[in-house]
Image (cartoon, grey):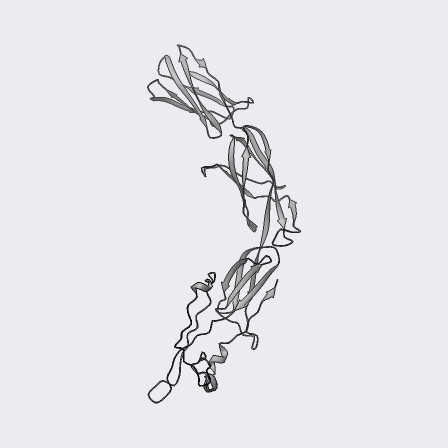
Amino acid sequence: MIFGRVTRSDGAPVPGAALTLCDLSGDQLDRAAADEGGHYQLVPPTGGTYLVICASSTHQPQASLVAVADRPLRHDVGLAGGGASLGGTVGVRHGGGTNGAGTGISSGWGDVVLTLTDVRGTVVAVTRSAADGSYRFADLTEGTYTLTAAAPRLAPVAETVRVPNEGHVAHHIALATRTQLSGTVRSAGAGRPVAEALATLVSEDGHVVGSRVTGEDGSFRFDDVAHGVYTITASGYAPVASEIEIGPGHPSDVVLSLVPPAVDAPASSSDAAPSRPDVPRGDDGASVNGNGFGGRHGQHGDQDSAETRTQSGGERW
């Protein structure tokens, strides 16, 4: 029998370390896992020379040749690396502006999920911050890791952390609180809700945070908005033109289909559709309007076209 203890460089046990017993041809003969104290046992079939392989997800592996006689043999394994730890405090950044100016950080945010991944994207360890915001990862091997922190109502954060071979690395994390913004677009005259209008939220530094198309009740909603100062604007339908002919044998009414605004970013000016040169014009040169009439003859338009015109503007939040 081969027995012993698996420890790291400072003498602390390495629980869960996997030990494999192989003969010199590479065939596996026995397997074991170190207990909480780092102790293990392997049973070879007979006396002879064997290969003992010890591996751990948090330490560098080690292989040794062991000669076994007719009585138990003690073989202790010391694993290199894995003596480093990573810890710190999770805080929350309260907005004083979207550009980060005037922000304050408070500590003590508990129940934040912290995930540590290596350069291959493999999850090394997962933990949660305590009530005081503290967290700790132990038994880490040397290398570069990505530390991610996430929690409800907070914007997730991913940061790169360098861990040495041994010692403790202090790394504090600041997350930003987020809020849900909702509202309604209404016509300026009658105050009726405007469906399929485009509400756009712009940050203080001029970046478009997002756009939403209003529902039937004119409502819109932005989820997970960071604290700060924004400008919100609302816009309605783009104008359309349709050629019609008035006279005997032709329909006396017309239906115009307005295209709702698109949420996607507007195309560049070079991609814009060219204006139609064949759009009919009135006798005074004015282009035909949305109800099919233009110039001085446009005063016979139907009454519904007036209801499609709404006014919208920007409001500063």
How many discs mark residues in the rendered view?
0
Q: The C terminus appears in which quarter of the rendering? A: bottom right
Residue 96, x across and y down, in percent: 65, 53
Q: Residue furthest top?
A: 70
Residue 13, x across and y down, in percent: 52, 24
Relative vertical location of residue 49 with respect to residue 249 in this rendering, above or below = above
Q: Residue furthest bottom?
A: 248
In the shown orientation, is residue 205 left or right of residue 239? Answer: right
Relative vertical location of residue 96 with respect to residue 238 in this rendering, above or below = above
Which residue occupies the foreground of this view, 230 or 52? 230
Residue 220, x across and y down, in percent: 52, 64
Q: Quadrant of residue 297?
A: bottom left
Q: Quadrant of residue 312?
A: bottom right
Residue 145, x across and y down, in percent: 51, 37
Which residue occupies the foreground of this view, 26 or 35? 26
Residue name at image x 60 percent, y 66 percent:
315
Relative vertical location of residue 82 with respect to residue 269 in this rendering, above or below = above
Which residue occupies the foreground of this view, 4 or 300? 300
Residue name at image x 59 percent, y 47 percent:
175
Q: The N terminus appears in which quarter of the rendering? A: top left
Residue name at image x 43 percent, y 81 percent:
281
